[in-house]
Amino acid sequence: MHQALASGQYNDREVRTAIAHARRMVECSRIKVRNLREEEMLKSRNDRDHRNGEQKKRSEVKRRVRKKEQDMKVKMALEENQRVLKEKTQKQILMQKRRMHRNTERGKITEAHMKYLEDQLKENQNEHAQQYDGVSLELSYSASQMSDLKMMEQQIQQEAELEVELEYAAIEASVSSALSSAPLGAPSPGGESVGAQSASVDISV
């Protein structure tokens, strides 16, 4: 167009108008290209943000699944520990009950034997008092025998009480050891920790 303007063959005004129009079209093209590039960059950034968001969502889902699985494992471990502790404690209480019952039964049997021996001694004392002299010597001997029997009875009773006390101490030590071996600090579904869920067992008789 500049050549056409310089040749003088065309109307200068028309040529200049055409040149101005061409320049405006070139500018429009440049704006178009710049806008397209900007739109492409924005689209790429949006796509990247979307992918990052999806990745974060998937990572969060995986994290929650792992946490839920871990919580379930902790819960199952706590329940298993509590079940084992409960069964062990119940068995120990049953064994203690049996031993105490046997001790009581043996004590009653011993008491019956002692009563029988006392009655026999009293009967013998009466017979000896009627048939023989030396009553004082016989009574002294019988009193000595009765004293020995009383001492035997007291000794048996003390041994039975000591055995019961030792059994109590052994059971309490076993329960304390089982409780201290349970995992601590792990959260349970109700928000309670292991320590808070430790079973308290009454082993009193």
Image (cartoon, rainbow, N blue to C red):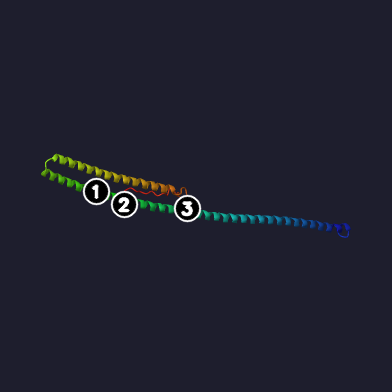
Nearest the viewer among 6 and 14 is 6
Q: Tag 1: Cα neighbours inside 10 Å, few (<14), some, or many (≥20)?
A: some
Residue 171 x/y as whole percent: 36, 48
Nearest the viewer among 175 and 139 is 139
Tell which circle, 3 or 1, labels the residue nearer the N-terminal end. 3
Looking at the rendered image, the disc whose residue lies closer to the viewer, 2 or 3, is: 2
Residue lying at 81% horizontally and 58% vertically, measured from the top left: 18
Residue 158 x/y as whole percent: 28, 44
Q: Is residue 89 above or below residue 145?
A: below
Tell which circle, 2 or 3, labels the residue nearer the N-terminal end. 3
Q: Secondary structure at mark 2?
A: helix
Residue 8 x/y as whole percent: 88, 58
Q: Secondary structure at mark 1?
A: helix
Question: Disc 2 to disc 3, how far (Cα)?
Answer: 36 Å
Question: Disc 1 to disc 2, how far (Cα)?
Answer: 18 Å
Q: Secondary structure at mark 3?
A: helix
* Residue located beneath label 2 in the image: 98
* Residue located beneath label 3 in the image: 74
Nearest the viewer among 139 and 38 is 139
Nearest the viewer among 150 and 10 is 150
* Identity, as a three-letter code, of the amino acid under mark 1: Thr
* Identity, as a three-letter code, of the amino acid under mark 3: Val
* Identity, as a three-letter code, of the amino acid under mark 2: Arg
* Residue located beneath label 1 in the image: 110
In the image, taking residue 162 as reference, residue 47 lies left or right, namely right
Residue lying at 17% horizontally and 45% vertically, measured from the top left: 121
Looking at the rendered image, the disc whose residue lies closer to the viewer, 3 or 1, is: 1
Residue lying at 34% horizontally and 45% vertically, measured from the top left: 166
Residue lying at 69% horizontally and 57% vertically, measured from the top left: 40
